[in-house]
Image (cartoon, rainbow, N blue to C red):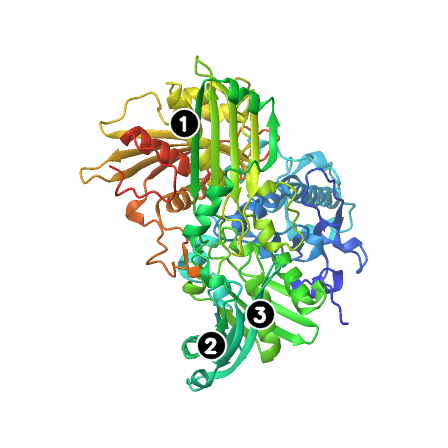
Amino acid sequence: MKTTSSLDRRNFIRLSGLTGAALALGFRSFASDEVAEPVLYNMETVSESFGVTPFVIIDKTGLITIMNPKPEMGQGTFQSVPSLIAEELEVAIDKVIIKQTGGEAAYGQQTAGGSSSVRTGYMQLRKTGAAAREMLITAASQIWQVPVTECYAENAMVIHKPSGKKLGYGELVETASKLPVPQSPVLKKAEDFKILGKSVDRPDIPLKVSGKAIFGIDADVPGMVYASVERCPVFGSKLVSYDDKGALAVKGVLQVIKSERVYGKNKYEGIAVIADNYWSALQGRKALKIVWDYQGFDTFNSKAYEQSLRDQSKEEGLVAHSVGDFDKAYVETGHKLEAFYETPMVSHSPMEPMNCTVQWHDANTVEVWVSTQGPAIIKREISQTQGIAPENIKVNVLFNGGGFGRRLAGDFANEAAGIAKVVGKPVKVIWTREDDTQMGPFRPMTYSAMKGALSPDGKVVAFQHKVISPSIGATQNAKYDKTKVDKTMVEGISEQKYEFPNMKNAFVLSETHIPLAPWRSVTSSTLAFAHECFIDELAIQAKKDPLAFRLELMSKESDARKVLLKIKEFSKWDQPLPKGWGRGVAQYEFFAGLAAHVVEVSRQANGSVKVEKVYCVIDLGTVVNPDNVKAQVEGAVVMGITAAVKDGIIFEKGKSVQTNFQNNKMLRINEMPKVEVLILADGGPVIKGVGEPGLPPVAPALANAVFAATGKRIRRLPMDLTKLI
């Protein structure tokens, strides 16, 4: 079997176009783990077979290239991650070339998901830039024969303080490349930052507004043909037969073949129509005549499945976390409260639908052009389905038109790889919006049975959150262990800083054949709705202000308490609102980070409720680009409101009723409230995520605001804001 390596020195120099000496620093077996202490290396001084990841390259012309290991999908990693190196290297981000990595193993974890892009590798990437800076300064001091302490770096130059002499980085690389690489370079102090913590322009924005940015759907390979795939919308069906005469009669259609989409343990058959243009492929697909065997899955419908979840709520379930003796405290306490919360399946609906272009160079080497959140995921899945080594798969990561967790899967890519292998030409497979909406995977339907008990003075004595839902893991993994709690499905409910003396949280698994996947903020987007709305219900029962009630439950100092105190001040919680208005609060802390929202709504004359304003306090510890953070929180608010008030995915006769944006609606710009964001970045040791924490509090804060304005308690999503009064 032929094998290649894009990381040895010979190939690196060839691929990057370098001639002569260069300073190229990276890690051996880079690990996205702040506990690890990876060793920095200079590619000029190591053997060709040594696995080194060049994160920064400076050539003799002064050209600086910084590698970005985190795919850009609108969240700003094309600027934020390279900025970690550029800050320490003393170069402006608009003066460097940024290149995207493609899943090469030695670059470590390259997945953009879980709000991890900046959190993972923050210190190591800064050390890379700092090490290069120190080497360049040392090189200049040797050339000038002056003490290192008399030299400093600025604007890609080293300057001699006493004389004012200057040397550009390009003039220094030959000398610098022969120096030992400092393993513990001195990092800049926060007060000296020129990029980090500043609102710096993003280099991808001009490309996107001018139309020059290349997304996956824009990939263009010589000799490329197009494919559109008909898949059965009833999951679990089997292909019986198909008639392709009508498809082959369409001008431009070249051939019709069987295809297979593999998603975890699931395999879905399809019929791919290949044409010399996409329109013909799509029209040929519509002309297919296919017979499917639904295998009985055409009886599946959401109403029956919802009822099964309600019935299962009576089960004890598996205990996810326990404090004190909930059962005893709940029985012995007089004032009890129970509530049942329901959230639907939803689609990811990125604006760029799934697509992938694949070319096989020979039987064992393949090249992929794709919008993905994880190039290593694409490599792994194509390797598994096509039986070739991951190192023989080259992934060209292009800009993503949204991901939200959908592009953490590689099913659409391995399907394209299989089609291209049969066709023998480069093939671009494009999903329609209907494919994207109906074919999943979806955010799982999640129900929550809540119980609480209050003492006579309004203190919470007992608290329980029981989650009844399918499992993302169970729908993907054939070896899923049903005897254990799926921690993803109870995400965050036991980690809140509320001080309950008696608490028992549980999980009840409800099986389904529908493919499921993480959706932005995973299951925190559904569980926070139940958790924070029920906290509000307890506050009302205790006749206490909802925000003050939360603070009473957090007597100990914590980041969550700090955020609540800030949101109280930031939103002017204690100031009266106009007549007919109401405000609600919610906070949620989970693996990705922590945020709190206050939502203000108003009752309208026509009986509807309008979302007026959203305040958000997000706790980060460290911020790279405040503008990115604000944009991410605003985007989270859009998705949070959309999931709270727009269509969920409903199944009838085994398939999704929703097909496109006419019945799977998104929030429109005229519905968007004003959003104010306060960033807490005190420079603490814990670096928290941005992309996801701003979403979970949205729905509960909105529902709590609706109650404050109308007296109507919302326990089921989506809520119809036009029919609340």
Q: Where is residue 627? Give x, y as percent.
A: 45, 41
* Mark closer to the chain start, 3 or 1: 3
Residue 409 picture quarter: bottom right
Q: How dense is the environment of label 2, judged by Cα within 10 Å: few (below 14), some, or many (20 and up)? A: some
Q: CA distance from mark 3 to mark 1?
A: 48 Å
Q: Where is residue 372? Give x, y as percent.
A: 55, 58
In the image, residue 65 sits, relative to residue 545, either above or below, namely below
Q: How dense is the environment of label 1, judged by Cα within 10 Å: few (below 14), some, or many (20 and up)? A: many
Q: Secondary structure at mark 2?
A: strand
In the image, what residue occupies the spot 62% across and 44% down? 89
Kind of residue at badge 1 = Asp
In the image, residue 113 sits, relative to residue 601, either above or below, namely below
Q: Where is residue 660? Give x, y as percent.
A: 37, 60
Res 324 visible: yes
Q: Nearer the viewer, residue 578 or 703?
A: 703
Q: Residue furthest left?
A: 605
Residue 290 image label: 2
In the image: residue 424, left or right of residue 400: right
Q: Nearer the viewer, residue 399 or 184?
A: 399
Report the residue marked by disc 3. Answer: 260
